[in-house]
Image (cartoon, coloured by chain):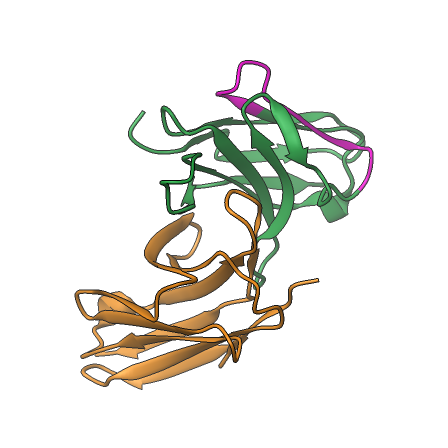
Amino acid sequence: KQEVTQIPAALSVPEGENLVLNCSFTDSAIYNLQWFRQDPGKGLTSLLLIQSSQREQTSGRLNASLDKSSGRSTLYIAASQPGDSATYLCAVQKHNNNDMRFGAGTRLTVKP
Amino acid sequence: GAGVSQTPSNKVTEKGKYVELRCDPISGHTALYWYRQSLGQGPEFLIYFQGTGAADDSGLPNDRFFAVRPEGSVSTLKIQRTERGDSAVYLCASSLHGTANTGELFFGEGSRLTVL
């Protein structure tokens, strides 16, 4: 069974810092990996999706990398802002349109 | 609609009651998923529909939980004889189907269920 782990569970940084969130998964036979953002009391907002054949995806200040063979992904956030404060979740999908397995998330706080 | 819509946004019920939660996916999305999220945890898979049929219901915790999608669009998650442990946020997601799609999931805002 696929297990997804996110480290750290919580992270607090001052505004302007660059930071890295980590995600690891036990079964490397994945179809894709998706990073989400969740604000308190809200649903999940998709940030980046990396197909299994890809190494990384970028969107604005966000960059996600994937090393399938080692079962790892990182989400890099450049020049962090207080508005980036949220919980960041990664999820892996084994086959197209089957369910995604989620990590417990990293709760990020960016202090002004 | 423009996004995944879930109703109600909040539901408070008493132990033992029956509850229905509704999900209206993005128009044209044939795949629909239900997840459950407890406080401080990531979403936990419940059931996945491809069209009208449940392709994978392995995440449903027991036979008190049931979901339908009779016309391949709107889905209803039904919980019988609710228990306090059923309290959670129930999330619905949808995605396109087909070899050309990315499998990207789009989530609704969730239905927060509280069982007293």
Q: Is residue B65 above or below residue A70?
A: above
Residue occupying the point 62% across, 35% down: B12
- Residue A102's spot in the image, x, y percent? 55, 60
> Viewed as shown, does residue A108 lie left or right of B37?
left
Residue occupying the point 31% across, 70% down: A56
What colour denotes chain A? orange
Main secondary structure of the magenta stretch: loop
**Magenta includes B29?**
no
Q: Which chain is in green here?
A: B
**Magenta includes B70?**
yes
Q: Is residue B69 or residue A11 the one in the foreground?
A: B69
> Viewed as shown, does residue B2 lie left or right of A44?
left
**Quarter of the image holding residue A40?**
bottom left
Q: Is residue A18 above or below residue B98?
A: below
> Viewed as shown, does residue A68 lie left or right of A112?
right
Q: Is residue B99 above or below residue A78?
A: above
Q: Is residue A67 above or below residue B56?
A: below
Residue occupying the point 50% across, 33% down: B31
- Residue A2's spot in the image, x, y percent? 65, 64
Q: Quadrant of the N terminus of chain B?
A: top left
Q: Residue furthest top?
A: B71
Q: Is residue B109 or residue B113 the one in the foreground?
A: B109
Residue occupying the point 56% across, 66% down: A104
**Quarter of the image holding residue B78?**
top right
Q: Is residue B58 or residue A36 the one in the foreground?
A: B58
Q: Is residue B75 or residue A71 the one in the foreground?
A: A71
Magenta range: B62-75
Q: Quadrant of the C terminus of chain B?
A: top right
- Residue B68's spot in the image, x, y percent? 64, 22
